[in-house]
Image (tube, grey):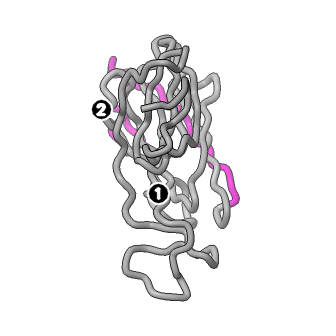
Amino acid sequence: MTDFPGLFAAGDGGHPHCVVGGNDGNVYACDRGDDRIEVFDKALTHLVRIIPVVPGTGVTLGNNGAVCTAGTSPPCAPGLGTAGSAWDLRFTNDAVQTYFFEIDGGNEIMHTMERASGAIVANLGEPGHDGGAQFTFLHSNTVDSKGNVYTGETINGRRIQKFLHVECNNGNGQGNGNGNCD
């Protein structure tokens, strides 16, 4: 997987787009071009596992800065290729970092993923720019001490959005996606 500790092999096609340390002692690298998160040990000498992320949907950035989709014709000629799906991640701030929020810029969505299994347990967002949880060039995120999530959009998005953490009283700490607890 690597030529040297912490380096992606030349023929592997990897494009590290984020690097985040987990409290489990591992280092998580967003491999945007390969739609995955690569998890390394702290010394960067051993690939612990690969967490696949939903592949891109054919959305590309055109050479004129426009958002292009598969089958679009000029003036939306593809310039940079597919955007990939693993752009950034941030862990929840509970002691064991049960989940992480993964930014999927290729699909304009934020996935909530379970750290232990790598499973996507919830999604937030869609392409657009007219309302909350609509994203245009979704690029990065962070989590504050209260569990609120902030997202950053670049290029034509040019904004930051804040999503409030809601504590559920149902014992499992999860909502149903509609702002209510199950």
Work out whether residue 124 or residue 179 is closer to the camera in this orientation and state it: 124
- Residues rendered magenta in the picture: 158-182
Which secondary structure, mark 1? loop
Which secondary structure, mark 2? loop
User: Residue drawn at (58%, 37%), measured in percent from left and top?
Assistant: 18
Kind of residue at disc 2: Asp
Q: Is tag 2's residue or tag 1's residue first in the polypeptide sequence?
A: 1
Residue 106 in the image, given as x and y percentages of width and height: 46, 57
Work out whether residue 143 or residue 32 is closer to the camera in this orientation and state it: 32
User: Residue drawn at (60%, 44%), measured in percent from left and top?
Assistant: 140
Residue 151 in the image, given as x and y percentages of width and height: 60, 45
Residue 52 placement: quadrant:
top left
Work out whether residue 10 or residue 75 is closer to the camera in this orientation and state it: 10
Kind of residue at disc 1: Gly
Give yes or no for residue 91 being in the magenta stretch: no
The number of discs equals: 2
Q: Quadrant of the C terminus?
A: top left
User: Residue drawn at (64%, 28%), measured in percent from left and top?
Assistant: 144
User: Residue drawn at (51%, 88%), measured in percent from left and top?
Assistant: 74
Task: Name the dominant secondary structure of the magenta segment.
Answer: loop
The residue at which mark 1 appears reads as: 106
Q: Quadrant of the N terminus?
A: top left
Residue 114 in the image, given as x and y percentages of width and height: 36, 28
Q: Is residue 50 left or right of residue 66?
A: left
Q: Is residue 68 left or right of residue 113?
A: right
The residue at which mark 2 appears reads as: 182
Q: Is residue 163 above or below residue 66?
A: above
